[in-house]
Image (cartoon, helix red, strand yellow):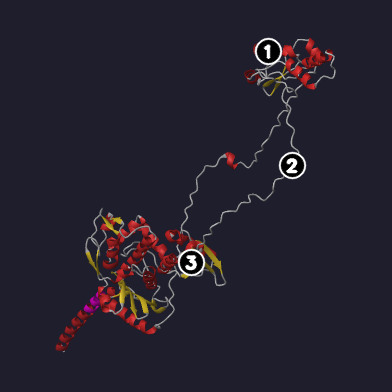
Amino acid sequence: MPSRGRETATVIPISLTARLWAFLLLAIVAPATVTAAPFAAYVIDARTGQPIYKQNEDTRLHPASLTKMMTLYMAFTAIERGQVRLDSQFPVSTNAASEPPSKLGLKAGQRIELRYLIRAAAIKSANDAATAIGEGLAGSEEAFAQQMTQMARALGMRNSNFRNAHGLTQEGHYSSAHDMTILGRRLFYDFPQYYNIFSRRSADAGIAQVSSTNKRFLDAYEGADGIKTGYTRAAGFNLTASAQRGNKRLVATVFGGTSTAHRNQVMAQLLDSGFTRVPNRVREVRPEAPRLLAQRVVRRAQVEPTAAATAPQTQRLVLSASAPPARVSRPAQASTAAVAQAPQAAPEAVAVGGLTLAASVRPVSRRAEPAVAEAAAPDAAQPQSASLAAPVLAASARPAPAPRSRTASIAAVAEASEAGNPGADPEAIARAVAEAVPQAGGASMSLLASPAPKPRSETVILAAMGEGDRSNPEELEIVSRPANSGRSWGVTLGMFSSKAEAEKLLLRSALQDGAILGGAQRHVADTKRGFQPSFANLTKGNAELICERFLSRSQECQVVGR
């Protein structure tokens, strides 16, 4: 019995120790299991965008450095729009230089070309380079994050929201496997001229030579040519990859891998399975151009209300009737005899509207001789007139008397009659009258002294009406040339559901490619299938060139012409 008691006493402590070790082991393992990032995956056929495999594809998770895919998409968009160039110098702020690794090693205050920042962000996944890109494009990382979110909405990424340009864990910063797969396909189709950067194993980043974080998968998987890796403790090991085999191309995303090897292995299995399930030949459906919404800022002036502006009473305008003009009374006309006998009285002044108008008397009929003497007298002898025209009349020369003196004419005729020749020659009478008229300036003013006009010819000359010059006209040289000088080509840009969308595309394209489309004619055709925008009046070379640009932007385009 005592031995049993000792054995029992020995067994109890061993069982308690085992339970304690088991409890400690669970305490250590359980947190790792609870805090492990959730798994998500999404695979699509890049040619059509159709899904092949999906698991938790819409779950909002931490994207980690997959965020830099959107940062690079925004940079490529700015370059294509002409806002920046690859050789544009971007300043490095203190915020960008202080980002945690992985980083290029930028220093605050230095300037570096955009091409080097793109290489560092795409290949090395440098956080400082991504922040410098965002601040250089938008002015601040916060403003750039808002632009990233707006672009995500335009691309159809429904479960993405960005708070920074690098992808480090931050509250409110999330995405999904579906959205990142869509973004990877967009990078391939929207910017094929820049897509090859994701397949590089190393590159010169200006201040350092950088190596790819995706080198293992690119080397291990046949046909892989991109795109981007990502890792944080909250996100796990993430990867968006693209691979091509023959005519087939797949894009896939994995969230929440437990290690780099585990992530790459799962991605390889998803791609292998996907290649066996998609057909060899399908009709390629390129993604449509992103539809960005422009924000309008309307500023309203703040004006303090006044009593006059807010008074409900209506204002009346009263036009006062002006007084009728005063009637001018004319003095009674005196007879010629009365005026000749009485001295001239001062003219009567009549006030009309502030001006004094003088009513002059009727002039007296003058005899011939007094008229000549009166013409030679100075103007000072004349009475001053109150008329406004008096100074002007005083400055002008006094007119010579008309050669119509009745006294001279009567005297001449009387002399002819007294000579006993009542039927005298009219020419003699005219000469006598001319001699009796006084001379002015040495020249005779008598109308009778002028010679008689020559008799007119009775011949009538008829002019030829409408025939004009009968001489032979010069021969006209007609030069013909082709219509529009070879500008008989054009391009059509697919179909749209509304005319406004078609016109918007034409306007945006004309502004973006003004060097080629400057003289082109824009037209929107209303067809049964929809509204078809087109450019006309192009040369064949320009039509082919602009169509290539549209195709590179994933915009359907077709050259039309003779």
Crowd class of label 1 (few under 14; some 14 to 19; many from 20; radius 10 Å): few
Q: Position of residue 189 (x, y in %)?
A: 39, 71
Residue 490: which numbered mark, if any? 3
Gap between marks 1 and 3, in whole Å?
Answer: 90 Å
Is 24 part of what is drawn in magenta? yes
Magenta span has 349? no
Give the class, few, some or many, for how many residues have Cα within 10 Å of label 2's Cα (few <14, many ≥20). Answer: few
Q: Tag 3's secondary structure?
A: strand
Three-letter amino acid code of the residue under disc 1: Gln
Along the line of sight, the residue nearer the viewer: 254 or 198:
198
Give the labeled residue for mark 1: 382
Q: Is residue 22 left or right of residue 83?
A: left
**Residue 353's spot in the image, x, y percent?**
68, 24
Q: Earlier in the sequence, mark 1 or mark 3?
A: 1
Q: Which residues are magenta?
A: 21-29
**Residue at the image position 36 percent from the left and 82 percent from the top:** 275
The reply to whether callout 1 and callout 2 are in contact (CB within 8 Å) is no
Sooner in the amino-acid sequence: mark 3 or mark 2: 2
Give the answer, above or below, for where 10 lies relative to 123.
below
Main secondary structure found in the magenta portion: helix
Front in this rendered view, residue 186 or 281: 281
Label disc, if present, on residue 460 of the rendered structure: 2
The label nearer to you, 3 versus 2, is: 2
* Residue 7 visible in the shown view: yes
Q: Are marks 3 and 2 in contact (CB under 8 Å)?
A: no
Which circle's residue, 1 or 2, is located before the other in the chain? Answer: 1
Whether pointer 1 and pointer 3 mark residues with C-beta atoms closer than 8 Å, the reply is: no
The quadrant in which residue 350 appears is top right
Outermost residue, bottom side: 1
- Per the image, label 2 sits on a secondary structure element best described as loop
Where residue 308 sits, quadrant-wise, is top right
